[in-house]
Amino acid sequence: MPKVKKEKGSKVLRHDPLANQILEDEATSGLRSTPRVKQAKKDREEGREEDDMKMIPPSVSRKILEAAREQKEEDEENEADKIPGDAASIASIGSDEEVEEMSDVEVDEEGYIINESMSAEDERALEMFLPKASDNAPKARTLADVILEKIQEKESQQQSQQAEEERAGTSGLSPKVVETYCEIGQYLSRYKAGKIPKAFKVIANLKNWEEVLYLTKPVEWRPAAMYQAVRIFISNLNPRMAQRFLNLVLLPAIREDVVEHKRLNFNYYQALKKSIFKPAAFFKGILLPLAAENCTLKEAVIVSSIMGKVSIPVMHAAATLVKLCQMTPWYGTTSIFIATLVNKKYALPLRTVEALCQHFCAFKEDERILPVIWHRSMLLFVQRYKYDLDEAQRRALKDLLKVHYHEAVGPEIRRELIATKPGEAPSSMDVG
């Protein structure tokens, strides 16, 4: 066969060896031929969408209305095939993945928590240290009070606010948006189980979420709706905003339910457990306001039982203990909260241990007969942190026992105070 002549200036195309081609095919198999969209671009787009959702301009209100209309049509189709209150709707409660274990509390037929009550004698003794109705305690503010204050402030600054809104392109809430959220409020006032409207889930992403939330009338929500709302807002709000939601919406509902039924609904109980997901918001929005206000014995026992069952970060528990120790005036229910947090057996900072010691020693000049819960909280303190006390603190607590001594608890406290660390010889202060 004659040899192929090369043309001038042309290059001969050479193939790689077959083995190299096979290895290259195996190495590049499954790889994209076109590059992916860069993540940074996606992040910028998502951030732009989040900024757009901060307020409800007229352009976005139409989308909210469409989502609400679709949700309403779906609910109407589902309700057409299902009778309210039937077995299927009740069973749907258990299918929710977020419903936590129900075996940790006892629930009666009406869905209320069965709590272990204190003895009648303990309750009578503790009532002496509870705030009376005649006390000039500050009334707890609700979301309605905050909204009314904001409306008054808006009216006083109407001209400047209007100019700013016109420059920003937002002239308030659309009438259709107001109507939509009012309808959602009516739906939540009879909610038992099922889907939550999509437009309601958007509220947590808005700057004026308090104003929009007020349109749904949280005071009329059913307990099941409150639990779903806590799940949504605790997950999406920052700790400061979550604190306001818990203090203005959840806390008044829980206190009203306890006063009306003398016990707590299971959905409210679950909502309290879910709220500890943001511990700073829970302590500042629920626990500390309860301890500072006219908290009842039932409320203190219920909240303490939840704290005892849920894991809490150490530093949040330590900071709360310091606040409780420094709180004045002292109520008997404060010792219930202190005993619960101390009994979690955390490795507390020395500052917190010192604050607890000073708290108990401050009762040396108190001539009243203190309730059993105070002695019990002191016993739990010395049992858990006796090795963290120095000689001066132990001496002060021993002197305190000479003033406030309980026949059943006092000997146990003294025994713990004279105990020495393993491997150390007893000091002269441990005698007597």
Image: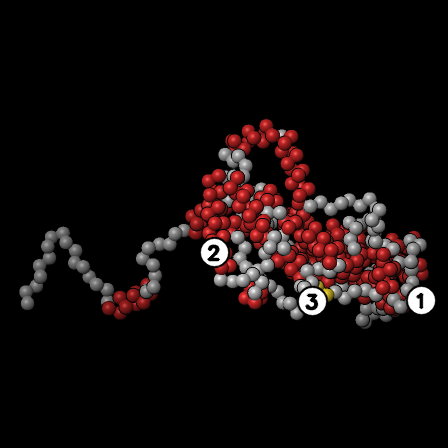
The residue sitting at 18% across, 59% down in the picture is 13
Q: Earlier in the sequence, mark 3 or mark 1?
A: 3
Camera-nearest label, 1 or 2: 2
Instruction: Tell me if 54 is positioned left or right of 342 in this view.
Output: left
Question: Quick one: which residue is furthest to the left in this view?
Answer: 2
Camera-nearest label, 3 or 1: 3
The x and y percentages for residue 145 are: 68, 42
The x and y percentages for residue 316 are: 69, 55
Depth order, front residue of 3/330: 330
Gap in angstroms between the C-alphas marked 3 and 2:
33 Å
Task: Find numbered disc 1 in the image and state the secondary structure of the residue it sits on.
Answer: loop
- Residue 108 is tagged as 3
* Amino acid beneath label 1: Gly
Q: Quadrant of residue 112?
A: bottom right
Q: Which residue is mark 2?
A: 74
The x and y percentages for residue 427 are: 89, 66
The residue sitting at 85% across, 67% down in the picture is 416
Task: Find numbered disc 3 in the image and state the secondary structure of the residue it sits on.
Answer: loop
Gap in angstroms between the C-alphas marked 1 and 2:
76 Å
Q: Which residue is mark 1?
A: 432
The residue sitting at 54% across, 59% down in the picture is 194
- Tell me the colour scheme of the image: secondary structure
Q: Are marks 3 and 2 in contact (CB under 8 Å)?
A: no
Mark 2 Cα-neighbour bin, 10 Å: few <14, some 14–19, many ≥20: few
* Amino acid beneath label 2: Glu
Gap in angstroms between the C-alphas marked 3 and 1:
51 Å
| Res. 229 visible in picture | no
Task: Find numbered disc 2 in the image and state the secondary structure of the residue it sits on.
Answer: helix
The x and y percentages for residue 102 are: 64, 67
Q: Are marks 3 and 1 in contact (CB under 8 Å)?
A: no
Instruction: Tell me if 35 is positioned left or right of 69 in this view.
Output: left
